[in-house]
Image (cartoon, rainbow, N blue to C red):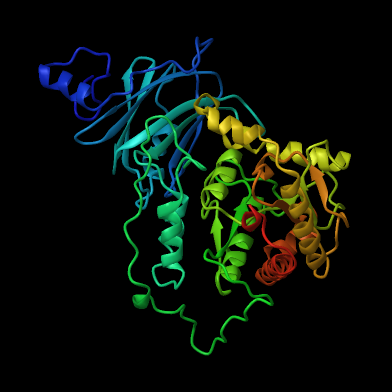
Amino acid sequence: MADDTFPARADTKPANGSRRRLLASTGVLLAFQVIPSLSRASTIVAVRTWPADEYTRVTLEMDTELKAEHFTLDNPHRLVVDIQGVTINSTIKELVSKIRPNDPYIASVRVGQNRADVVRLVMDLKQPIAPQVFTLKPIGEYKYRLVLDLYPKIAQDPLLAILNNTESDPLASVLEDLAQNAPLADAPVPTVPGQNLPSKPSAPPPPSRLPPIATKPNEPAPAPPSFTRQRSKPLLIAIDPGHGGEDPGAIGRAGTREKDIVLSIAKRLKKLIDAQPNTRAYLTRDGDYFVPLHVRVQKARRVKADLFISVHADAWIKPSARGSSVYALSQNGASSAAARMMAKRENEADLIGGVNLGSHNEQVAKVLLDLSTTAQINDSMRVGDMILGEIGKINTLHKRNVERAGFAVLKAPDIPSILIETAFISNPEEERKLRSDRHQDRIARAVLVGINGYFESSPTLAQRS
C-alpha cells in the first residue's frame, strides 16, 4: 500500500523518480531489524506516550519478542514504523487518541494493517527529528517493549534551558556569558545519533533593561542566605528528581508514585533556591519523562553545577521501615549491605525506564565509569551531613550517618553529589506525609538550610578547581 496515509517503504521501488529523489534528499533511515525471528504472532497489550520538551517517547508493550523497521520522510516530516508479526487490534488503535495537542514533536498518528502480518504506524511530525527505535526485554511489571524516542534534530543545551527561564532575572547576563564561553567539549550536550549540536546563544540584552525579580503582593522579600561571597558566576544547584516516565519508582500502598512526589519536592526546592540572591537551581527533569542516569550527570556537568542533589523516596518489603537517609558515592564498596542494595535498586532505573544501550558513545561510557575524586567525595559527605542533620529535625532518620555506595547518578567527578531518600513511601504513615504539601515544603526548606550551611562553611569544589 503506497498512498498518502501509508507511504511506501524506503526499500520499495518508488512509483516515479520524484519519490526516489525525495527519499534520497531526506537522509532516510533505512529499515533495520531489532530482534531476529518470531516464534509466534505478537499481541500489543498496551501503548503509552510521554511527551516532553526534551523528547517524546512512545512505547508499545507486547507479549512476545518482535522485530520492527522504521524510516523517515520529509515534506511533510513523518516517521514510519512497520511492526512485524502482529495484526491491528483495539489497543494499538488507542495510540491515535493518546497523542496530546501540546506534544512538541508529534502532530498525529495513523495506524493501519499494511500487510497481512505488518502493522504500520505513520507519525505526522511538527519538526524534524532524530528517532531512536529499540526494544527492551521484560522487567518488573513490563513485558517486551518497542520504544520510539523522538529527539529534536538540533540537540537541546541544558544551559539554554536555564536562560529560557531567566528573561527577567538580574543574573541572566551572567548565565548568558557562561553559556557563550562553556565549550561543548567540556561536558557534551546529551546527543543521539542523527542529532546536531546546538549553536551558541546570541548576545545578552544590556543589564540595565533587566527588571528585578518580582514578588507577589504583600509577600515579604525572600530572606538572604546567611553567607556572602563575591562570585562572577552564581551558585548553581542541580536538582535531580529521580525516576520519571516509564519508570514510576516505588509505589506506596495508596498508589502514590515516587516519581510524582520527588518532582513536586524538587520544584519546591528550586523555587526556594531561586529566591535567594546570586543562587539558581536547575532541574534535570521538569516533567513526567524518563532521563537516563548518565544524562542526569551530563546535564549537571554541562551547566557547571556547584552541587548535585538527587531526590528519591525509599521503599522496603516491610511497611514498618521508616525514616530519611542521605547517600554519597563510594569508591571502595558500600558502607553497609542496605546501602549496596539501595544503590543496586536505583542503578536499575535505566533498565526499567529504558535506555538504548546501542547508542552509548565513548563519552557516555567515560561518565559512567569515571571514578570521582577524593575531593568530590569529601565535599559530598560534608554537605550530606548538614542536610541529614536538618532533615532529622522534621522527620525520623533511617540512618543517622551519611551512607556510601556506588550510585551511578553520583559519579560526576567534579561536582559534590548526594542522593536523598526523603522517607519510606512503602510506610503508610510516611506515604501520607509525602503526599502533604506542608510536609513537602518542610523537606525542601530543610534541604535548603543544609545547602546554605555547606556553602557558608566551605568553598565549593568548582571554585577550588
Q: Position of residue 207 (x, y in %)?
A: 38, 73
Q: Residue at x 56, y 47 (%)?
A: 301
Q: Residue at x 63, y 34 (%)?
A: 368
The quarter of the picture where residue 113 lies is top left
Q: Position of residue 238 (x, y in %)?
A: 59, 56
The quarter of the picture where residue 14 lies is top left
Residue at the farthest bottom position = 218
Q: Count the marks: how many?
A: 0
Q: Residue at x 23, y 25 (%)?
A: 7
The residue closer to the viewer here, 194 or 268, is 194
Q: Residue at x 83, y 58 (%)?
A: 323
Q: Quadrant of the N terminus?
A: top left
Res 253 seen here: no
Q: Position of residue 33 (x, y in %)?
A: 44, 15
The quarter of the picture where residue 223 lies is bottom right
The residue closer to the viewer here, 354 or 113, is 354
Res 104 seen here: yes
334 left or right, relative to 376? right
Q: Position of residue 376 (x, y in %)?
A: 71, 49
372 left or right, relative to 121? right
The residue closer to the viewer here, 77 or 304, is 304
